[in-house]
């Protein structure tokens, strides 16, 4: 080996390393070729070996990173799957609890399903963010869960309640609030469960909250709940047509109902009512189930 | 360099003797590519007789590891010693490949 060839080889090595530092690995094989110490001068071979080790270390890190990424993606996939099945379990529980409450004072869940659909309709109309809508749906499903704690003699009494009995019935919102507080996934149903009997003028219960003091979801739900009660058949009354129900409710706007919410609801109430009353209990359940999938599986 | 190939039920055990460097790395890669083409997915490389490994040798191991990984298999190593172990440590190979005390140990771990 002459000094000249050593000089040329050094220039070549320098040029390749320049390329590598710019991210161009096309000539990298030449570096490993130059590590052959039986062929090239030791100072060149040693330098090439040092560069070669650098490159191998970088490649090793790259491989390590790729493996970690693959593992991470795999873990992420199973987490997503787990989260989906947990969500399905939660939704299932919501539906089952809703039906359980409904069984307590009637043999159908239809009222529960309908009020949910009315409430969702209003919530969407008001442009509520998905988070608030989820809380509203949970609240609507579970609004009367506290009735579980009320005795049959009072809950199912066919004729009017006396003052003492009425006071007992009113405690269902407190019982409901207590029940759902025990499970964090349900705790945001609280606004509706505790406050759905508040009135806009402060004459409701349990806290006598007024106007904006009443949580928005509770104000929305109150409109949905009363509208469905009026348009449904009850032991003591026939089902009113939606126009008449709205007319009755109008006299309570500002005293019972939030004017803005009522005005929004009354615009489409008749057509929504037509759609909803045309559905069987199974159809109501399926419609609601689809909406739940949309809002909760995101 | 010499490569001795032993077919075990769960893996192919390679015993590499001599130097794995820029001169011998191509032969090593060709041998391994042939084994992989013939259906080998699990390789245990016994390095007790490996005297020296250069950057080019390490690069060949990385390439083979990547090929096997793509087939759902892997290459693991046994009997690392002296400078070979040092080089593995420096280059971060310990975190990519599984290292075993002996080929028997490696085969046992393959279940």
Image (cartoon, grey):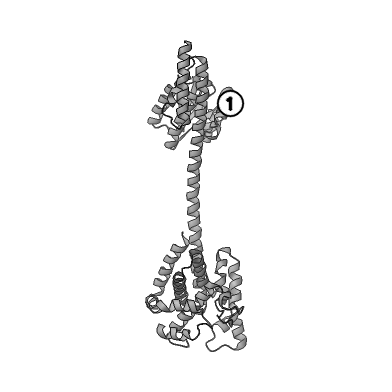
User: Foreground residue, A6 or A66?
Assistant: A6
Other-residue count near label 1 (Cα within 10 Å), few / some / many at <14 / 14–19 / ≥20: few
Residue at coordinates 50% horizontally, 83% vertically from top-left? Answer: A253
**Image: B73 above or below A219:** above
Q: Does any portion of residue B9 appear in the rendered image?
A: no
Give the left or right position of residue A178, taking residue A251 as reference: right
Q: Position of residue A213 (x, y in %)?
A: 58, 75
Residue at coordinates 50% horizontally, 60% vertically from top-left? Answer: A87
**Image: A185 above or below B14:** below
User: Foreground residue, B51 or B38?
Assistant: B51
User: Foreground residue, A6 or A79?
Assistant: A6
Q: Position of residue B102 (x, y in %)?
A: 55, 28
Q: Position of residue A254 (x, y in %)?
A: 52, 82
Q: Position of residue A128 (x, y in %)?
A: 48, 68
Chain on which label 1 sits: B
- Number of numbered discs on residues: 1
Q: Does any portion of residue A74 appear in the rendered image?
A: yes
User: Foreground residue, A85 or B105?
Assistant: A85
Q: Secondary structure under badge 1?
A: helix
Residue at coordinates 59% horizontally, 23% vertically from top-left? Answer: B82
The answer to which quarter of the image holds residue A12 is top left
The residue indicated by pointer 1 is: B86
The answer to which quarter of the image holds residue B25 is top left
């Amino acid at each position: 080996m002459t000094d000249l060839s050593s000089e040329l080889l050094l220039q070549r090595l320098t040029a390749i390393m320049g390329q590598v530092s710019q991210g161009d690995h096309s000539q990298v094989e030449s570096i490993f070729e130059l590590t052959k110490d039986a062929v090239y001068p030791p100072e060149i071979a040693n330098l090439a070996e040092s560069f070669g080790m650098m490159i191998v270390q970088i490649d090793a890190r790259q491989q390590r990173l790729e493996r970690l990424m693959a593992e991470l993606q795999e873990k992420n996939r199973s987490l997503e799957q787990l989260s989906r099945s947990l969500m399905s379990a939660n939704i299932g529980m919501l539906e089952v609890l809703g039906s359980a409450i409904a069984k307590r004072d009637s043999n159908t869940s239809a009222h529960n399903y309908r009020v949910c659909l009315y409430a969702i309709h209003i919530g969407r109309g008001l442009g509520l963010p998905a988070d608030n809508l989820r809380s509203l749906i949970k609240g609507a499903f579970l609004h009367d869960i506290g009735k579980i704690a009320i005795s049959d003699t009072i809950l199912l009494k066919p004729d009017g309640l006396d003052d003492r009995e009425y006071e007992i019935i009113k405690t269902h919102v407190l019982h409901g609030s207590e029940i759902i507080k025990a499970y964090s996934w349900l705790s945001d149903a609280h606004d509706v469960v505790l406050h759905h009997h508040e009135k806009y003028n402060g004459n409701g219960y349990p806290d006598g909250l007024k106007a904006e003091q009443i949580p928005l979801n509770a104000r929305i739900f109150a409109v949905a709940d009363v509208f469905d009660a009026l348009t449904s058949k009850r032991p003591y009354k026939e089902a009113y047509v939606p126009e008449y129900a709205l007319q009755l409710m109008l006299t309570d706007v500002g005293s019972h109902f939030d004017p803005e919410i009522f005005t929004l609801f009354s615009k489409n109430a008749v057509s929504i009512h037509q759609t909803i009353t045309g559905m069987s209990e199974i159809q109501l359940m399926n419609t609601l189930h689809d909406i739940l999938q949309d809002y909760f599986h995101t | 360099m010499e490569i001795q190939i032993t077919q075990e039920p769960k893996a192919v055990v390679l015993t590499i003797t001599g130097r794995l460097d820029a001169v011998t790395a191509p032969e090593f890669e060709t041998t391994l590519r042939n084994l992989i083409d013939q259906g080998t997915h699990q390789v245990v490389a016994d390095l007790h007789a490996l005297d020296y490994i250069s950057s080019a040798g390490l690069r060949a191991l990385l390439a083979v590891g990547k090929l096997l990984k793509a087939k759902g298999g892997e290459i693991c190593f046994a009997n690392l010693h002296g400078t070979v172990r040092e080089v593995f440590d420096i280059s971060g190979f310990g975190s990519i490949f599984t290292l075993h005390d002996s080929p028997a140990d490696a085969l046992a771990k393959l279940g």
